[in-house]
Image: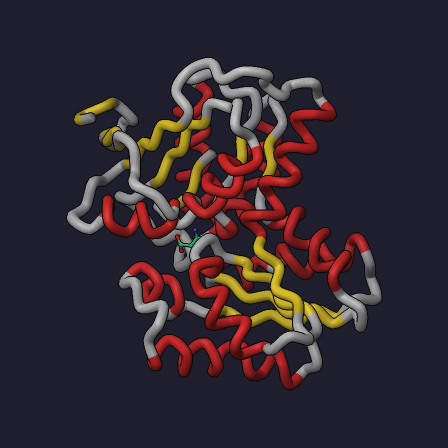
Amino acid sequence: MFDSGIGGLTVLKAVMERLPNESLLYFGDTARLPYGTKSRETVIRFSTEIVNFLLTRNPKIIVIACNTASAYALETIKAMVDIPVLGVIEPGADAALRATRNNKVGVIGTRATILSGAYVEAIQSRKPDTKVFSKACPLLVPIIEEGWIDHPVTRQITEHYVGPLLDCGIDTLILGCTHYPLLKPVFSAIVGPDVSLVDSAEETAAVVEGLLKQKHLLSKALRGPRCEIVVSDMHLNLRIQASRFLGTEIPRITVVNSEFQEITG
Ligand code: DGL
């Protein structure tokens, strides 16, 4: 699986919890993040390069563990490989449709994810009469990476973003960014008990399991390393941030250069 950086570790964590026998390789493009502020062309180019790297390891499935890359590059990647490819958008859309009772769904994500309209399309192609209200939340990724979870500023900014969606009467809110599961307590406090939160990381892990079962690809015993993390830049704070997202100590991290060649372990 891959992500623009370490946020996708929320997806890795969910997949690890569900699939104890799978050997997982995670690539975080820490040299080039964020993707959420970049153009479609650039995100597709980066994603394609990463997938070419992942293919050298013969994966049986590729998970795009990044909402922005899923929004922009899913179709390109699907056309490029002959193994199953899964993004995080469709599992989130399905879960939102299961959760909503009044057909009013809110979606929050990076500017790129929201501008792409990918969630709106995924939801309305499944159930056209659903009203989808979207809001880009560009300040949340840096705040979460700073670890400001329990901070009054975070609460204030989150209220600013989510308030207009609540005013529209949504009863379901999709957390359409890898980073947002870390803010779940803040979102819950703001939206209250009558609005369901959809965590696309958890939903994606459930779909990965279903897909592997359906294709008879589920592993019965662990073969190979349980989890390998590869990044394109090892910045100073990486280890601390990464363990926050994974919820545990990070195993060995491998760093590759712009040619995807290993430079350190
Ligand atoms: N991983 C990105 C996403 O889920 C958030 C971080 C970024 O902008 O690269 O959209």
Q: Position of residue 86 (x, y in %)?
A: 60, 37
Can you say whether 194 is above or below 82 in the image?
below
Give how far across and how far down residue 44 sits, in percent: 47, 41
The residue sitting at 48% across, 68% down in the picture is 185
Question: Where 213 sits versus 137, above or below?
Answer: above
Split into 4 quadrants, where in the image is the C terminus? top left
Horizontally, residue 186 falls left or right of residue 76, namely: left
Examine the image and state in which quarter residue 206 appears: top right
Q: How many marks?
A: 0
Question: In the image, residue 188 lies at what x, y percent?
Answer: 54, 71
Model colouring:
secondary structure
**What residue is at 40 percent from the left and 39 percent from the top?**
46
Left or right? Give the position of 15 relative to 92.
Answer: left
Residue 191 quadrant: bottom right
In the rendered image, the residue lying farthest to the bottom is 167
Q: Is 204 in front, or is 87? A: 204
Residue 201: x %, y % from top left: 54, 48
Query: 237 or 138: which is nearer to us?
Result: 237
Q: Residue at x 80, y 69 (%)?
A: 101
The answer to whether 143 appears left or right of 16 in the picture is left
Question: What residue is rendered at 49% in x and 35% in y?
Answer: 16
Classify 168 as above or below 147. Answer: below
What is the quadrant of residue 171 in the picture? bottom right
